[in-house]
Amino acid sequence: MTSSDDAQVVRISATDTHALRLAVLRADTPTKDVEFAEDDWPGAVHLGLRVGDELVGTSSWVPRRYEGPGAESEQHAHPAVQLRGMATARHLQGRGLGGILLEGGLAEMAAAGYELAWARARDAALDFYLRHGFEVRGDGFIDATTQLPHHLIVRSLR
């Protein structure tokens, strides 16, 4: 049994995210590509959740301005960060570990000076993000890469 008390958010490399991206994010999609063009962008941060020696969650954070619905009210001068590739090992989902990783990442991004976090979230994960203070912006869409329904979501870090 895995305890959230044993969980630690750590910085990892983009390559370290690949196994979980493949197992969780690409298992039910037409593509198996786990590398994102933004992985090596200046300022990109990759975080992992370790429980003991096991990497059980990953997330990537990319400096990128939000330009979706409602952007005009977000005061474009404020720095934003896009969450990409959030994944928790399937056998551990529903135990609060993804929330630890997400909240740890949001705290790190706020400390780095970002004022808005946003993502292109799968509809299957919307309830998770809503529980963590994100709000849905605009209509849903089918993501071109995954062919799955998504929505834009945002959360203020101020």
Image (spheres, grey):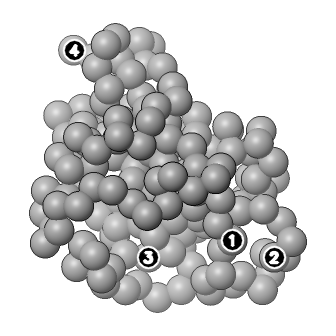
- Badge 4: few (under 14), some or many (20 or more) residues near its Cα, within 10 Å? few
Q: Give the residue at mark 3.
A: 151
Q: What is the spatial separation of the Cα atoms under label 2 and label 1, in whole angstroms?
A: 7 Å
Q: Amino acid at mark 3?
A: His
The answer to which of marks 3 and 2 sits earlier in the sequence is 2
The answer to which of marks 2 and 1 sits earlier in the sequence is 1
The answer to which of marks 4 and 2 sits earlier in the sequence is 4
Q: Is residue 51 visible?
A: yes
Q: Give the residue at mark 1.
A: 65
Residue 139, given in percent of the width and then of the height, sits at: 46, 88
Could you say whether the residue bearing mark 3 is in a helix, strand or loop?
strand
Residue 1, above or below 24: above
Left or right of 13? Residue 157 is right
Q: Amino acid at mark 1?
A: Arg
Q: Give the residue at mark 2.
A: 76
The answer to which of marks 4 and 3 sits earlier in the sequence is 4
The answer to which of marks 3 and 1 sits earlier in the sequence is 1
The answer to which of marks 1 and 4 sits earlier in the sequence is 4
Q: What is the spatial separation of the Cα atoms under label 3 and label 2, in whole angstroms?
A: 20 Å
